[in-house]
Amino acid sequence: MSTAELKIDLINQITGITDKVRLKELLQLLKFQNDETVYLTNEDEKKAIMEARNEIKNEKVLSDAEVQKEINEWLSK
């Protein structure tokens, strides 16, 4: 599929959306994709990133299947 065909398909898909919330989410996503602003992290965010990296390094992570199982268990309560 060419770029032009992809654009036409995207336009057709968008014109079919009537949900205002979904349209706002799509617009936000498109703006985010085009934003070239450098995001600066604060100290709390840096700390959270380091903690997450350490958890990954120490294999303290769950698989997607494990997370989905936990979510389903939590939702069924």
Image (cartoon, rainbow, N blue to C red):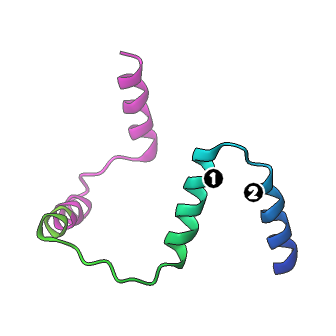
Mark 2–mark 1 contact, CB under 8 Å?
yes
Q: Check if residue 18 falls in the magenta segment.
A: no
**Residue 31 placement, left or right of 18:** left
The prevailing secondary structure element of the residues shown in magenta is: helix
Residue 49 x/y as whole percent: 22, 66
Left or right? Give the position of 49 relative to 12: left
Q: Quadrant of residue 42?
A: bottom left
Q: How far is the residue under mark 2 from the one under mark 1?
A: 8 Å
Vertical comparison of 54 with 1: above or below? above
Residue tagged 1: 23
Kind of residue sitting beneath label 2: Ile
Name the quadrant containing residue 45: bottom left
Residue type at tag 1: Leu
Query: Which residue carries the number 2 mark?
Result: 14
Q: Quadrant of the N terminus?
A: bottom right
Where disc 1 sits, the SS reads helix
Residue at the image point whose x is 60% and y is 58% from the top: 26
- Local crowd size for mark 2, using a 10 Å CA cut-off: few (<14), some (14–19), many (≥20): few
What residue sits 44% from the left and 46% below the top? Answer: 64
Write the start and end of the magenta stretch as one range: 49-77
Residue 37 on image: x %, y %: 39, 83
Please name the residue shown 81% across and 79% down the image: 3
